[in-house]
Image: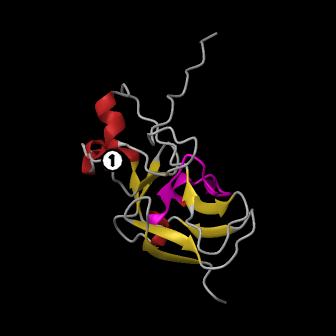
Amino acid sequence: MPARIVTRRSAIHGNGVFAATDIPAGTRLIQYKGRLLTQALSDRLYAGGADTGHTFLFSMNDDYVIDANHDGNSARWINHSCAPNCEAVVEEAGNGDRRRDRVFIESVRDIRQGEELTYNYGIVLDVPHTPALKRIWTCRCGAARCTGTMLQPKRRRRAEA
């Protein structure tokens, strides 16, 4: 079976992943792979990583992170976009073991051969989104409605009853 995706240099940022053939909406393209870390260990290992705006960490759930810096695959090269053609889907393990959850990248619309694959990283930081932090997490997607940052609005807390 011919490859559906290929990795090469990207106009958005560094490397990117591109459609090697036309891809229909709803296609599961690749699993995001890497070393499994607890959130706490990830925080210790990569303390200050938010200062660079470059990471291959994917928060899989509240307990675990996938570190594609180690044993990662080409899914780590899929760039962010404010108008993505893919999404990250967390598939929870049937037995409730959160270490066994998996992350897949799936197309949300038809993608033409040669088009770069993108998804919204959904980066939510629990610190003030200062101009300096927004510069670190600058978005380069070029979408017509680009927000200029990969940072997403903070989640609102529900009022306690």
Front residue of this view, candidates 132 and 52: 132
Amino acid type, residue under disc 1 in the picture: Gly
Residue farthest to the front?
144
Q: Is residue 19 magenta?
A: no
Residue 31 placement, left or right of 95: left
Q: Is residue 124 above or below residue 75?
A: above
Label 1: how many Cα within 10 Å (few below 14, some 14–19, many 20+): some
Residue 152 can be seen in this image: yes
Residue 106 percent coordinates (x, y): 65, 62
Residue 29 sits in which quadrant? bottom right
Residue 78 percent coordinates (x, y): 49, 63
Residue drawn at x 32%, y 49% as measured from the top left: 41
Residue 154 placement, left or right of 161: left
Q: Is residue 2 above or below residue 147?
A: below
Q: Is residue 145 above or below residue 160?
A: below
The residue carrying mark 1 is 53
Exactly how many numbered labels are in the figure? 1
Residue drawn at x 60%, y 84% as measured from the top left: 3
Front residue of this view, candidates 62 and 27: 27
Name the element at disc 1.
loop
Residue drawn at x 45%, y 38% as measured from the top left: 151
**Picture quarter with the C terminus:** top right
Residue 47 can be seen in this image: no
**Picture quarter with the N terminus:** bottom right
Q: Is residue 63 above or below residue 95?
A: above
Residue 119 percent coordinates (x, y): 56, 54
Colouring mode (rainbow / by chain / secondary structure / one colour): secondary structure
Q: Which residues are magenta?
A: 77-99
Residue farthest to the bottom?
1
Front residue of this view, candidates 132 and 3: 132
Residue drawn at x 55%, y 52% as measured from the top left: 98
